[in-house]
Amino acid sequence: MKKMDLNRLRVGQHDQAVHDVKAALLLERVAEEENIQVSDEEFNRELEALARQSKQTSEPCELV
């Protein structure tokens, strides 16, 4: 079995994480500037779709 190099994994994920954070901040700013609102119903519908896509439940989980 091949041993996982956590440092190499971390470095490999860094660029994608930075890109994802910048994209989220940009979208948040655009929504703010354009006064885009999301209803609770729209939010819940999207959450359900994401849960189905990832084969997970949308129910809140208990943190241990």
Image (spheres, rainbow, N blue to C red):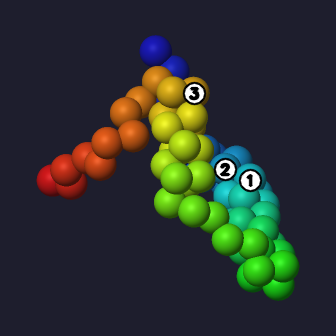
Q: Please report the residue visible at 57 percent of the width from the left and 27 percent of the height from the top.
A: 53
Sequence order check, earlier mark of 3 and 2 = 2
Q: Please report the residue visible at 47 percent of the width from the left and 24 percent of the height from the top.
A: 55
Marks 1 and 3 close (CB-CB < 8 Å):
no
Mark 2, residue position: 13
Mark 1, residue position: 16
Image side of residue 18 versus residue 48, left or right: right
Sequence order check, earlier mark of 1 and 3 = 1
Q: Is residue 28 visible?
A: yes
- Identify the disc placed on residue 51: none
Q: Is residue 25 visible?
A: no
Mark 3, residue position: 53
Q: What secondary structure is marked by label 3? A: helix
Question: What's under tag 2, amino acid-wise?
Answer: Gln
Depth check, mark 3 against mark 2: the one in front is 3
**Disc 1 versus disc 3: distance between alpha carbons?**
21 Å
Image side of residue 32 versus residue 40, left or right: right
Viewer-closest of 5 and 39? 39
Please provide percent x and percent y for residue 17.
Answer: 68, 58
